[in-house]
């Protein structure tokens, strides 16, 4: 999984650098769409988070920003399917949790993060960190 993440992260960084250096560069959305499919295929939770963060960063630098929201993986339809396929998989739990949080369903997002945090998967520490971030954000509100 580390090798997968490294490869995906390197390509996402490359896309980001291109967006910063050449905001008018052709093919950036095509490259992001390709990376989206790779992340879906690999099912690496860390790559999912990295992809979503880079998607936001690239959007900040594009001159004529296309609708990058369509390239987001945080889509309930995607993760409903993933949850049906393997409801306990880290990719499914983290993806659905982030999707629910994005859509404003904090209770469901927290519930899914707690489920992941209670597992023995290595991604549990990330779920615990996200839960802690939510507590801080809610305390500030």
Image (spheres, rainbow, N blue to C red):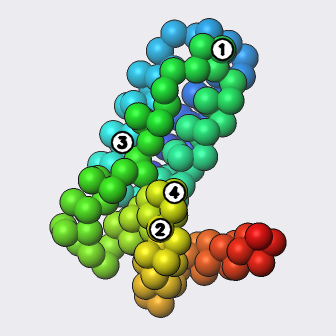
Mark 1 or mark 2, which is nearer the start of the sequence? 1
**Does 10 appear above or below 83?**
above
Question: In which quarter of the view is residue 89 placed?
Answer: bottom left
Disc 3 vs disc 2: which is toward the camera? 2
Please report contact status of discs 2 and 4: CB closer than 8 Å, yes or no.
Answer: no
Disc 4 vs disc 1: which is toward the camera? 4
Disc 2 vs disc 1: which is toward the camera? 2
Callout 3: 10 Å neighbours few (<14), some, many (20+)? some
Disc 2 vs disc 4: which is toward the camera? 2
Please report contact status of discs 3 and 4: CB closer than 8 Å, yes or no.
Answer: no
Report helix, strand or loop for mark 4: helix
Callout 1: 10 Å neighbours few (<14), some, many (20+)? few
Which residue is outermost to the right?
140
Q: Residue at x 51, y 10 (%)?
A: 26
Mark 1 or mark 3, which is nearer the start of the sequence? 3
**Does 20 appear above or below 10?**
above
> Where residue 105 appears, x then y in whole percent?
47, 68
Q: Which mark is residue 38?
A: 3
Mark 1 or mark 4, which is nearer the start of the sequence? 1
Distance Cα–Cα, label 3 vs label 1: 26 Å
* Residue for badge 1: 63
Question: In which quarter of the view is residue 60 placed?
Answer: top right
Mark 2 or mark 3, which is nearer the start of the sequence? 3
> Where residue 119 appears, x then y in whole percent?
44, 87
Disc 3 vs disc 1: which is toward the camera? 1
Distance Cα–Cα, label 2 vs label 1: 32 Å
Distance Cα–Cα, label 2 vs label 4: 7 Å
Is residue 130 in view from this perspective? yes
* Residue for badge 4: 102
Q: Residue at x 39, y 71 (%)?
A: 93
């Amino acid at each position: 999984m580390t090798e997968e993440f490294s490869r995906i992260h390197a390509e996402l960084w490359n896309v980001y650098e291109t967006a910063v250096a050449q905001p008018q560069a052709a093919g950036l959305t095509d490259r992001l769409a390709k990376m989206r499919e790779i992340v879906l295929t690999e099912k690496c939770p860390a790559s999912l988070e990295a992809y979503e963060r880079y998607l936001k960063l690239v959007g900040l630098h594009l001159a004529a920003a296309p609708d990058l929201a369509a390239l987001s993986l945080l889509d309930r339809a995607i993760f409903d399917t993933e949850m049906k396929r393997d409801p306990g998989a880290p990719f499914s739990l983290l993806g659905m949790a982030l999707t629910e949080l994005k859509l404003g369903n904090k209770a469901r997002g927290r519930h899914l993060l707690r489920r992941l945090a209670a597992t023995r998967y290595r991604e549990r520490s990330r779920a615990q960190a996200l839960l802690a971030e939510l507590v801080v954000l809610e305390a500030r509100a």
